Image (spheres, helix red, strand yellow):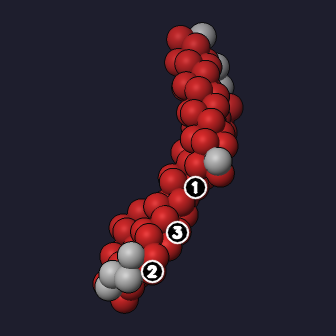
Amino acid sequence: MKRDKLQKNLINRLKTLKGHIGGIEKMIEEDKDCIDILIQISAIKSSIDKVGRAILEDHAHECVISSIKEEEEVEETVKEAIETILRFAK
């Protein structure tokens, strides 16, 4: 159930981001002030990072939990989760 809620939340955020990107296109077409455009771009970058972090958190949590439940190599799973986090953080 939590996963359905997360998925719906992420889809809504991405739809909102699409709208903001369209807004930036319009701002550029209307030759709006560069500072205003850059502020909107900054907001989009922050939003997309939040989407990525939510996906990453869910992925890491699910991988570790499933490896514990299935009695797999937990240490290797945690290592892979950390590597994924570090790649995303760059």
- Which marked residue is nearer to the observer: mark 3 or mark 2? 2
Number of numbered labels in the structure image = 3
User: Circle 1 is placed at which residue position?
Assistant: 54
Name the amino acid, label 2: Ile
Residue 23 lies, with reference to residue 9, above or below; the image says above
* Marks 1 and 2, the one that precedes in the sequence: 1
Where, by quadrant of the figure, is residue 81 drawn? bottom left
Q: Give the percent coordinates (x, y) of residue 55.
A: 51, 54
Identify the element where label 1 is drawn: helix
Which of disc 2 and disc 3 is earlier in sequence?
3
Any mark on residue 61, and which?
Answer: 3
Alpha-carbon span between mark 1 and mark 3:
11 Å
Mark 3 and mark 2: span between their CA atoms?
A: 11 Å
Residue 13 occupies quadrant: top right
Q: Which residue is mark 2?
A: 68
Q: Nearer the viewer, mark 1 or mark 2?
A: 2
